[in-house]
Image: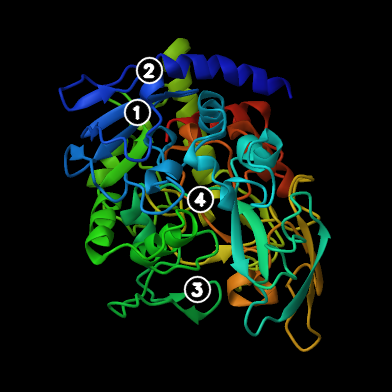
């Protein structure tokens, strides 16, 4: 599309945005030092900035600088040489980008632990030395997520229609193996700004399903159910145990002391696109560290990302360069908050008594102040996994899900559903959950392409394009540019 070329001009302007004055504890990290190796042992500054296509990302430790030598988030805990940081890179907003993965493949000739066969290959049975064996990771940023099959008390059966990775039909790792597993492929979520992700809604139950929230196994308190794409782990501690045993291939769970250190770090680190002094108050990592989580922001009084007034153009004013970029981002914030469109056939939104379709805005669902997540817990099917609304994804497996005759069907797709990833249904066993995924946060987007849990949007313009097609919004070229520029500063 022609407008995409124009975005490049705005990106160049964004790169010119200056950072705030540096102090001894605030550093610009050079590109050749941006990748954090497991066991690196270097000190993590209280604030550090990393270049990306839209400017710079800032990662800030609220507790100050951190000595990482021996720290369990930065130290290999398993047998494959990985640490938590391997898949949660500071330069990539505490996730990992395709750009970084490709650079790492080239620099290490595919030997970096991030490419470990367990989930960094399309299937562990493939030749790990070949680039083609890691195509899903290198081209789409996708790790293999392997889950036990069948789901207990599942309302549906499942068959493989297409299996380009070969893993679902593999005699050792597949659905009919001695230890039956289903393999789906997902992006790693950011391990930053987590106080916003883990704060449960005050209502205490999932308003999308009417079900009670999961509980913290240690305290019995309700949890947000927002941590993972399928909400299968309730807390940061249980997630860390799961990640250590599966992705790091640790022989045992981390110790209590290691878990406490991981938790302390993950709840003090904040990541957002860096902006200069005098920018809108909700931008930047420092704002995230200071603000309070759990606030609803889908109105003009308390907008999701706070006020963009400082960047707005005055009536009749002609702007150029950096000022024009900022005014565009401010317009994008307004579009996000106030531009209505019809939302239809979205499970766990159009099924909660609001009607189908309903006329709302982006901030209807992305309503949590400071992150753009959903204050209400739970998951939605916006169509990124399920046909016919999913983009053509021939590199991903395709499954046919058939709901039992005595079970409620998927509310919009009936009893036979074609999906690239059953999502929450692989945990709940419910037909209504097929394809549903929990929302991700918007902060640090510029650093961690591609987007959506399945990596189907390669960049920010593609992200906007998907929503425009899915809900027939008919954004103008200017509105698309403004939205991209808005998201690029978050």
Instruction: Say which label, 1 or 3, has the lower sequence index.
Output: 3
Tell me what residue is drawn at x 20 percent, y 20 percent.
22
Q: CA distance from mark 3 to mark 4?
A: 17 Å
Q: Which residue is mark 3?
A: 207
x then y, percent, for residue 184: 65, 57
Q: CA distance from mark 2 to mark 4?
A: 27 Å
Q: Nearer the viewer, residue 359 or 315?
A: 359
Q: Which residue is mark 2?
A: 17
Tell me what residue is drawn at x 46 percent, y 66 percent.
377
Q: CA distance from mark 2 to mark 1?
A: 9 Å
Pointer 3 and pointer 2: residues touching (CB < 8 Å)? Answer: no
Q: Quadrant of the N terminus?
A: top right
Q: CA distance from mark 3 to mark 2?
A: 41 Å
Q: Which residue is mark 1?
A: 274
Pointer 2 and pointer 1: residues touching (CB < 8 Å)? Answer: yes
* Left or right of 445 in this view: 121: right
* Left or right of 248 in this view: 60: left
């Amino acid at each position: 599309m022609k407008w995409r070329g124009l975005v490049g001009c705005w990106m160049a302007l964004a790169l010119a945005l200056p950072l705030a004055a540096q102090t001894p504890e605030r550093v610009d990290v050079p590109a050749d030092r941006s990748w954090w190796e497991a066991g690196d042992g270097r000190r993590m500054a209280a604030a550090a900035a990393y270049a990306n296509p839209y400017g710079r990302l800032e990662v800030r430790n609220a507790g100050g600088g951190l000595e990482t030598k021996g720290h369990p988030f930065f130290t290999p805990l398993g047998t494959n040489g990985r640490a938590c940081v391997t898949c949660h890179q500071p330069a990539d907003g505490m996730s990992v980008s395709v750009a970084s993965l490709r650079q790492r493949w080239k620099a290490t000739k595919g030997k970096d632990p991030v490419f470990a066969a367990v989930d960094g290959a399309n299937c562990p049975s493939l030749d790990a030395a070949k680039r083609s064996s890691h195509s899903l990771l290198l081209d789409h940023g996708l790790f293999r997520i392997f889950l036990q099959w069948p789901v207990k008390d599942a309302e549906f059966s499942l068959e493989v229609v297409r299996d380009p990775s070969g893993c679902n039909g593999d005699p050792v790792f597949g659905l009919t193996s001695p230890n039956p597993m289903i393999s789906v492929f997902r992006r790693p979520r950011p391990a930053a700004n987590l106080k916003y992700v883990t704060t449960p809604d005050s209502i205490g139950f999932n308003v999308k399903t009417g079900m009670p929230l999961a509980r913290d196994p240690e305290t019995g308190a309700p949890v947000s159910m927002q941590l993972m794409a399928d909400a299968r782990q309730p807390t940061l501690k249980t997630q860390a145990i799961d990640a250590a045993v599966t992705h790091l291939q640790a022989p045992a769970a981390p110790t209590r002391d290691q878990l406490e250190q991981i938790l302390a770090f993950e709840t003090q680190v904040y990541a957002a696109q860096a902006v200069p002094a005098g920018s809108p108050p909700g931008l930047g990592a420092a704002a995230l560290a200071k603000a309070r989580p759990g606030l609803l922001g889908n109105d003009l009084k308390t907008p999701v990302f706070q006020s963009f007034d400082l960047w707005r153009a005055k009536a009749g004013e002609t702007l150029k360069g950096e000022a024009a970029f900022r005014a565009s981002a401010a317009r994008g914030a307004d579009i996000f908050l106030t531009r209505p469109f019809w939302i239809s056939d979205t499970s766990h939104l159009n099924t909660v008594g609001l009607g189908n379709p309903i006329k709302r805005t982006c901030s209807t669902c992305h309503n949590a102040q400071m992150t753009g997540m959903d204050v209400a817990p739970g998951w939605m099917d916006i169509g990124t996994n399920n046909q016919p609304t999913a983009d053509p994804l021939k590199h991903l497996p395709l499954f046919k899900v058939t709901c039992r005759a005595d079970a409620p069907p998927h509310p919009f797709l009936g009893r036979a559903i074609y999906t690239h990833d059953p999502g929450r249904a692989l945990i709940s066993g419910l037909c209504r959950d097929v394809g549903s995924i929990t929302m991700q946060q918007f902060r640090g987007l510029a650093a961690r392409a591609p987007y959506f849990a399945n990596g189907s949007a390669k960049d920010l313009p593609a992200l906007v394009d998907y929503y425009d097609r899915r809900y027939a919004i008919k954004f103008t070229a200017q509105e698309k540019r403004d939205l991209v520029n808005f998201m690029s500063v978050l």
